[in-house]
Image: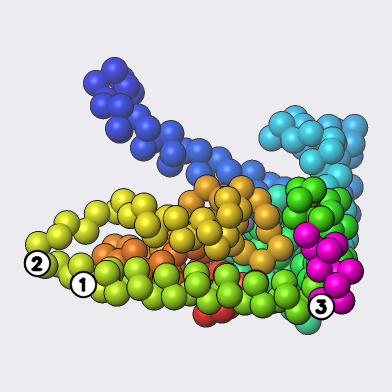
């Protein structure tokens, strides 16, 4: 084989193809290890230990072998995930994440779910699942947000002074602030409706070019609503993508009601068609 005559594209395609095959074979090898261990097959074939066996044959580390063996024991009562491990259908890295939320009841659904997600998307999925099902400290309410971020409100002295003065006057500060927050929400919603009308006009052949570039006014109102962070509840990671929930290619629209700033992880999940993300979509 003389690769010198190959184009870059051909070489790259071969690398991808062989790489994918190597990873799949490695997953299958890992899936065999629990059985090799049970039979102590490595001994009879002249390897000092299961670790020696795995290192010699495929270059797996001591730690990786332990992870596989531990995982197999934890999946003992979850046959679908167990089979995904032993057949190499799902990688050990994904299974290790998902085992923390897997139960006898939900594990079949989980297996189906994570089979289609990338490793990074599985991490986000598991994190959200834990939040949603209260496997972590509750994250709703201002109290836990305060605990999460370790921050109290940062008020300038003059603002704090005015609020204290109002409080001293017997004015209900909570009612006042609730009103201000409601007004803010209403103003943002109205602005988005207005901008959405402009987007609806921009049908093809209307003479206006519809590009992927999101107009400044639309970016501004989204920033007003979400700040610089991910729009998924309780996430607060830096937003890196302005996601078109209805797909820009299909709609050719930047309707701000269907645009959401997302962090890298939630953007991955959104494109994996995740159920959690979709549920929040309708909430606006
Ligand atoms: Zn997107
Ligand atoms: Zn996020």
Quickly name the residue at label 1. 201
- Indicate yes or no: mark 3 CB to ligand 2 under 8 Å: no
Q: For mark 2, give the secondary structure.
A: loop
- Asked if residue 279 is positioned above or below residue 3 in the image, the reply reads below
- Residue positioned 76% across, 51% down in the render: 158
Quickly name the residue at label 3. 172
State which quadrant residue 4 falls in.
top left
Tell us which disc is closer to us: 3 or 1.
3
Q: Which residues are magenta?
A: 162-171
Coloration mode: rainbow
Q: Nearer the viewer, residue 93 or 59?
A: 93
Separation of marks 3 and 1 at Cα, in angstroms: 45 Å
Marker disc for residue 205: 2
The reply to whether dot 3 and dot 1 touch (C-beta < 8 Å) is: no
Q: How many marks?
A: 3
Left or right, 249 with respect to 94, comes to left
Q: Nearer the viewer, residue 145 or 244?
A: 145
């Amino acid at each position: 084989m003389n690769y010198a005559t190959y184009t870059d594209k051909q070489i790259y395609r071969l690398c991808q193809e062989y790489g994918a095959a190597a990873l799949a074979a490695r997953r299958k090898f890992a899936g065999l290890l629990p059985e090799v261990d049970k039979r102590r097959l490595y001994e009879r074939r002249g390897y000092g230990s299961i670790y020696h066996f795995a290192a010699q044959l495929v270059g797996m580390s001591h730690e990786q072998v332990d992870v596989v063996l531990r995982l197999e024991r934890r999946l003992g009562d979850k046959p679908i995930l167990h089979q995904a491990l032993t057949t190499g259908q799902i990688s050990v890295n994904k299974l290790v994440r998902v085992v923390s939320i897997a139960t006898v009841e939900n594990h079949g659904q989980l297996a189906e779910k994570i089979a289609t997600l990338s490793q990074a998307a599985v991490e986000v999925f598991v994190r959200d699942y834990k939040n949603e099902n209260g496997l972590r400290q509750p994250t709703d309410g201002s109290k836990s947000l305060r605990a999460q971020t370790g921050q109290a409100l940062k008020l300038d002295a003059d603002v704090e002074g005015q609020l204290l003065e109002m409080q001293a006057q017997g004015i209900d500060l909570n009612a006042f602030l609730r009103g201000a927050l409601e007004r803010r929400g209403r103003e943002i919603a109205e602005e988005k409706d207005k901008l959405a009308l402009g987007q609806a006009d921009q049908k093809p052949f209307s003479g206006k070019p519809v590009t992927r570039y999101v107009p400044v006014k639309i970016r501004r109102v989204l920033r007003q609503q979400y700040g610089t962070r991910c729009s998924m509840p309780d996430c607060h990671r830096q937003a890196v993508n302005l996601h078109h929930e209805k797909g820009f290619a299909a709609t050719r629209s930047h309707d701000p009601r269907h645009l959401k700033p997302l962090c890298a992880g939630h953007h991955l999940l959104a494109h994996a068609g995740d159920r959690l993300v979709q549920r929040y979509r309708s909430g606006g």
